[in-house]
């Protein structure tokens, strides 16, 4: 697991199997983003059986199988889609190709698990909504900055337990390290990656909806810019947005590609949560200048001040819940409505964004 490179950051957690070997089989396709490794880890730790991998680039397949040698190499995506044992296909395609791949997977009778962002245009989102309705299949999205961060999961549990009252405001920070030289060409093509608010902003908006209990929100303001990468004119290296939810809770977040080289990890992701009875701060990946470990949660309420270090303590329950939802056709891990709304709002934030720096 590389802490320096966010593109290939693949958390590993406790094995917490919800199914027996062979009970829930999945295949993997489209290895364009390193998040596929974290997605695979989460599924396997929850008991899923990895059977297939496919990508047109044999070098990507070779690298993937170095971590997951149990995956058989498929000759084509069709070989995976035609296998009746496969229940779900996980994929990390180029962002603007994720929706079309998911539609194809669902039309073949499989559920689909996409890296974020799963859509780069509203047209893609609307088409996929139709396919979900027609097929009855599930379209999952890997919002890793909540689902694969124990500090964020624990913060959600504290909120659910009411320890800070009703959440009224969240401020989110999602800096990433650029690693420009190692990025693929599509990363700098806006049509392909969708824009910074659509891409890494999707993590932020999904968390806001979850932690405030909102099913919808309005984009009040958003802006983007390219401050330091004139050689990559379509790259947005900075973005921020302000939202308000249906219940009045507000959200301010910023995302950027300016992680300093001296930081021990790929980004100092943080979240500040204000409730009517207290506050929570999550330091996701590092506690700067104190500890290189992540998953630090700071709680202040009427009972006092508390610091929790929850790395290795909470686990990643989403993956097991997702598998059970696929088997039982339930919506306990995350509703389809929630997934689509988070994606809709990040697209809207991107579309409305003022470009403040070229």
Image: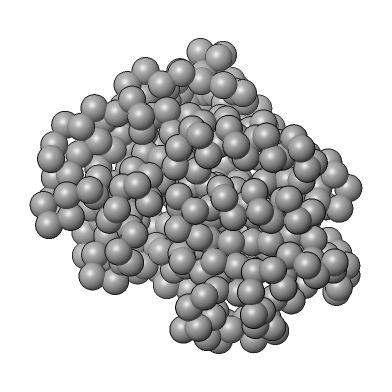
Image position, residue 233 (x, y; %): 17, 49
Residue 353 is at least partly visible in this image: yes
Name the spot of residue 90 as percent of width and height, x first: 64, 61
Q: Residue at left 50%, top 34%?
A: 123
Specify the color scheme. Answer: one colour
> Visible in this render: residue 177?
no
User: Is 311 on the left or on the right of 87, as rendered?
Assistant: left
Q: Position of residue 339 (x, y in %)?
A: 61, 37
Residue in the picture at 12% in, 57% down: 231
Q: Is residue 187 left or right of residue 210?
A: left
Position of the C terminus by quadrant: top left
Q: How many callouts does the rendering have?
A: 0
- The answer to which quarter of the image holds residue 329 is top right
Q: Residue at x 54, y 80 (%)?
A: 61
Find residue 341 and report its horizontal and vertical position in percent. Answer: 57, 30
95 or 78, nearer to the observer:
78
Direction from residue 24 to residue 155 in the image, left or right? left
Residue 330's place in the image compared with 351, above or below, is below
Residue pictured at 36% horizontal, 33% vertical: 350
């Amino acid at each position: 697991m590389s802490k320096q490179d966010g593109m290939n950051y693949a958390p590993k957690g406790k094995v917490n199997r919800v199914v027996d070997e062979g009970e829930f089989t999945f295949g993997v396709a489209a290895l364009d983003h390193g998040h596929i490794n974290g997605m695979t880890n989460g599924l396997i730790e929850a008991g899923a059986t990895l059977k297939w991998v496919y990508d047109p680039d044999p070098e990507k397949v070779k690298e993937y199988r170095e971590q997951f040698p149990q995956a058989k190499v498929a000759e084509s995506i069709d070989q995976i889609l035609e296998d009746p044992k496969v229940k779900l296909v996980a994929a990390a395609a180029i962002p603007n190709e994720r929706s079309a791949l998911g539609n194809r997977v669902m039309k073949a009778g499989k559920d689909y698990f996409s890296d974020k962002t799963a859509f780069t245009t509203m047209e893609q989102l609307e088409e996929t909504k139709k396919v979900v309705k027609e097929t009855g299949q599930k379209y999952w999205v890997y919002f890793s900055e909540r689902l694969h961060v124990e500090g964020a999961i624990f913060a959600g549990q504290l909120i659910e337990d009411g320890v800070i009252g009703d959440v009224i405001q969240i401020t989110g920070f999602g800096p990433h390290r650029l690693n420009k030289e190692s990025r693929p060409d599509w990363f700098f093509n806006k049509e392909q990656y969708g824009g910074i608010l659509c891409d890494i902003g999707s993590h932020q908006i999904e968390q806001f909806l979850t932690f405030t209990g909102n099913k919808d929100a309005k984009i009040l303001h958003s802006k983007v810019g390219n401050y330091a990468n004139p050689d990559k004119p379509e790259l947005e290296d900075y973005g921020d947005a302000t939202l308000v939810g249906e219940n009045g809770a507000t959200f301010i977040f910023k995302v950027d590609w300016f992680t300093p080289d001296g930081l021990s990890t790929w980004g100092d992701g943080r979240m500040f949560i204000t409730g009517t009875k207290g506050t929570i701060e999550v330091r996701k990946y590092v506690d700067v200048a104190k500890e290189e470990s992540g998953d630090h949660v700071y709680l202040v309420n009427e009972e006092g001040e508390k610091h929790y270090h929850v790395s290795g303590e909470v686990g990643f329950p989403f993956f097991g819940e997702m598998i059970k939802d696929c088997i039982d056709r339930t919506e306990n891990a995350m509703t389809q409505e929630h997934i689509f709304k988070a994606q809709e709002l990040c697209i809207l934030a991107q579309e409305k964004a003022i470009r403040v720096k070229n």
